[in-house]
Amino acid sequence: MPLLETASMQSERIVPVASKATDGAIGDDVAHLLKTVFEAQTSQQALDASYGLTNLLISTGSVRCLHTFNVIPEIKKAATDKKNGARRESSMLILGALFEQYPLKNPLSEVVFLLENGGLLYLALDLLADKGAVVREAAQYAIDALFACLKEESLVHALIEPLSQYLSKPTGKWQGTVGAYQLLEKVAKRAEIGTESKEKEELKDLLRLNLGQKLKDLIPIVEGGMHDLKAEVAKQAVKTMTALSTVLDNDDVAPRIPLLLKTMEKPSTETLQKAIHALSQTTFVAIVTSPVLALLTPLLERSLNTPTTTQEVLRQTVVVVENLTRLVHDPVEARTFLPKLKPGVQRVKDGASLPEVRELATRAMNVINKAMGVDEAGTTDSRATTEQVEAVLEEHTKPYIKFNHTDEKRFWETSRNYIANMVRDDANSRLLERIQVCVGPYLQSFVPEGKHDEIVATVKAHFVEEDERRFGVPVKEDDGEIEIVNANFSLGYGGRLLLSHANLRLLKGHRYGLCGRNGVGKSTLMRSIANGKLEGFPPQDVLKTCFVEHNQGEDAELSVLEFVTKDPEMAAAGEEKISAALNEVGFTPGPEGRQQQPVGSLSGGWKMKLALARAMVMGADVLLLDEPTNHLDVHNVKWLQEYLKKHTEVTSLIVSHDSGFLDEVCTDIYHYEQKKLVHYKGNLADFVKVKPEAKSYYTLSSANAHFKFPPPGILSGVKSATRIILRMTNCSYTYPGSSKPSLVDASCALTLSSRVAIIGGNGAGKSTLMKLLTGETIPQTGKVEKHPNLRIGYIKQHALEHVEMHMEKTPNQYLQWRYANGDDREVLLKQTRILTEEDKIQMAKPVDIGDGKGPRNIEALMGRQKYKKTFQYEVKWKNMLPKHNTQISRETLLELGFQKLVQEFDDHEASREGLGYRVLEPKVISKHFEDIGLDPEIANHNEIGGLSGGQKVKVVLAGAMWNNPHLLVLDEPTNFLDRDFLGGLAVAIREFKGGVVMISHNDEFVGALCPERWYVENGRMTHAGTTAVALDRFEDQSRNPSTVASSVVSSAAPSAVNSGAEDGGELKFKAKKKKKMTRAQLKEREVRRRLRHIEWLNSPAGTPHPPDTDDEQ
């Protein structure tokens, strides 16, 4: 009440009461104070007398005095006095004073106010509809006072029950209903994850967990309010449901919550179908708990039981039911919710018209039956129940409790059940310290003084013993090792809370693997540590910490030794020590040694070793390694493993998606679970034994990250998947400033069926070979030829280079920028496209083509068409009208030195053909990102600079695949990707219809995909022929025999240098000789094309238009 002074404001006015007064005297005082409250002339006088009355009642030490001295009957009588508004206001002031102080001094009063005589809260809610403003204000004061004084357990077990009953009453007043929904909303908001103290956040966790168990009863009630005819009630019910949905801590369902709430708010066949479709497109990975089931079960049940549900929606529904049920690990929760779905699934199984739907329903039924049964060992649930807790309480309190009246016994039974519910939740949540708070204060009114502490200790000891029986004796942290870090912290990034009151404890010499899905904040945590911004982590002067990360910005011109000594922090160590450290990791000293090489010429693997050498020079106590095996070959990975295991004085915190590396190196695992860091002893294999759902670290599966690549377009003249489309002949290349060539006399070829892995050590020339193939660089000797219309999707070794200039853009905006003009702007940045000074001089030279019109300057190429076995281009001449344009053959233009002009036009035509079926608008781009595995919400609204490394790689991959490339070129594709995305990428590559060539040190990934391998060593390339792919590395262990990859092994080796396809000539793609068609043939062709166009118009949106060619049958 803003106009009244509450207890904290006027405590000096409270009249002290003698504690030894007789019952008769107290009764007289109570009656006098009640009379004073009801006859007060002002609200403040009534409130002062109410506080005096409350203190008098509290001084008795018993809650039964509320009945003994007729206080509650008087409050009820005054609250329902329709003729006297002052008495109604006074009753609320008494109630507010009681609610504000009594539960804090005697928690047992919660039973009297809320569970017994269940009308006290109802009185306040009903009076929110009073015609008097002061009465409504007093009623709101009473409700707020009650909410403020209840602890977390009481909110769930004392407040939710009367609120549910009130909202279920059909005769309630709408203002009271709104007030009840508001109170429920406040309970949900009090449970939201925040950044308060650790103790408060732990209590929020408890409230969130316990409130989640109540959602199965609350959601139907609140959903009914969303359809109330009174607009104010419906609006508040929507707000309440939104707040309750925050209790769900499930990353899979969270993005779908707005759509699910809309379906509840406006139920219709259309909204239900949209919701089911969205759920069927969701990849469920996180464990499904009671709150998720409480939200989804009503929607799924409605879809299964509606007679008009289509077969397609039924199919999606049973698939969602099956996927959800597989992740329900608690049989008790399964037996609570799944019986509601089981009849509907059974009905689909028996009566669906489509065999496919019946088969899916059969599978879902089998999963449901398994989830509802006991576990494999035949044991049932071992969690504490209310009945068990009541039995323990009864056993230890029975000797001390005597009843004089039946009412006293009934009151004890109600109180005992209330205490048992709170203790049950604390025991099952393993917050055993809370048992004392939930038992001791409530027993003071029942057992003799001094005995309740003894009973509390006994009850607590009982449940501690039960907890140890279920989960084992807790491991003592004092294990004799040196603790160097023990930090409690919360971590957020870009408005997102990544970790809430997590604990990070590091022991000297241990090597910790940091595991979790992309985007949970692994790199953010390590960067916060490195920057000294993590709360509770020792500063650099106490504990020297070095961050070795994957994206470094080196000064390319300096030598390796100069680069390290230039760092002020390193210079103090002296050049001799620095040189020795560099030598230890492989940088040999001397004028010709690697220490004198320019930093810019180092491969990715050597750059990572340079970063490790810097850490060694610093003498780091803690080594932060972010994807340390990226760019490292097998030998260097082995070296790094031995280095880390040898230096037992250094503690390491490692983020890596290399399961073999983590298995070999780690002594402990920290796993991200529900915004906490959970510690597991042992390596990755030991962790997977404890958490079987983490088995994706060992298999390539698309179950958790399914996405697909667009099909490549048609290449004119290429009728076979084994026809060569890109060829490199006798190419050599030496980097500027380097005396040793990176690639020598290399020859190879690629087809649409190629699955090639390029293998070699760090610095052997693999990436140089890639750059020559894709046109990133120009060979100094030899030549690279490709089909004029060939489109290549290329991801560089340092994949983030593609987007590092666009950090302020969203992924959607980046793709719009890249393809805004119909061309891929990144292709125009390649060295084979940029005009050098020599090219500009060549462009300025007049050309005489022998047509009698003399020398002229070429301005641009305007068009291209087939000409015999090649192409001819329409040339626009400078300072001449278009009518003077000339058709010149490709060979003539190349002989005249206009290679880059021809290449640029070919790129434009290829890009135009690839983008012919693409509409560059946000909605279509969002769908493309979703196919690649990036959440459309992130793609549309998050800046690239705020994404994780793995998410940035998905942006790069989506950009490369936008124009439907024929050839996918991947340089270290496994870097930065988590296991789920790695499995999805492997399956997508396996199903891709175009060619794939990749560099990777990940033998698991390469062995599962690439039958053909090229080995590069000391700049020379050799072909190893074809080998069988390891199908057993895929979780499904089988492939679609129709895929391109399945036929590669048996196909002819197209890349053999001596195949005759790689003689010195140009790539020739013969154009079929045209015959003049008769009138009848022309009519038949027109009919075929019209029918094909009509069929295309009736096809699903996004289907590419079939080409109209002269090759039709």
Image (cartoon, rainbow, N blue to C red):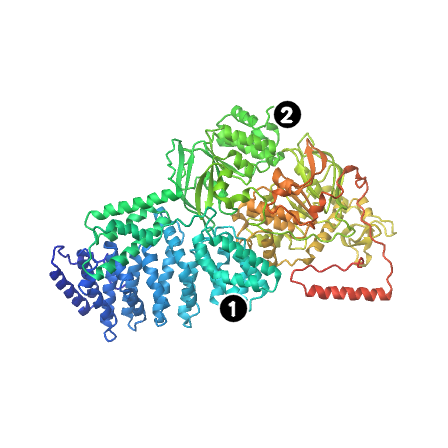
Cα distance, mark 2 to mark 1? 76 Å
- Relative placement, left or right, of 1102 versus 53 is right
The type of residue carrying mark 1 is Ser
Identify the residue under disc 2.
592
SS for callout 2: loop
Kindly identify the amino acid type of the residue bearing the numbered disc 2.
Answer: Glu
Q: Residues within 10 Å of mark 2 (few under 14, many from 20)?
A: few
Query: Does residue 673 sit above or below 583 in this rendering?
Result: below
Image quadrant where residue 489 sits: top left
Q: Position of residue 422 (x, y in %)?
A: 32, 53
Between residue 503 and residue 292, name the one nearer to us.
292
In this picture, residue 777 sits left or right of residue 417:
right
**Which of 1062 and 229 lies nearest the eye of the viewer?**
229
Q: Is residue 984 left or right of residue 14?
A: right
Q: Quadrant of residue 726?
A: top right
Residue 349 appears in the picture as rendered: yes
- Looking at the picture, how far across and down is residue 467, in whole percent? 36, 44
Quadrant where the N terminus sits is bottom left
Is disc 1 placed on a helix, strand or loop?
A: loop
Q: What residue do we see at 65% from left, 59% from top?
A: 919
Determine contact: label 2, label 1, CB under 8 Å.
Answer: no
Residue underneath mark 1:
268
Tell whether 168 sits left or right of 979: left
Residue 1058 lies, with reference to residue 242, above or below; the image says above
How busy is the neighbourhood of tag 1: few (under 14 within 10 Å), some, or many (20 plus)? few
**Which of marks 1 and 2 precedes in the sequence?**
1
Q: Which mark is residue 774?
A: none
Residue 756 in the image, given as x and y percentages of width and height:
69, 41
| Vertical comparison of 541 with 918: above or below | above
Task: Point out residue 114 in the picture as x, y percentages from the top left corner.
Answer: 29, 61
The answer to whether residue 280 is visible is no
Nearer to us of marks 2 and 1 is: 1
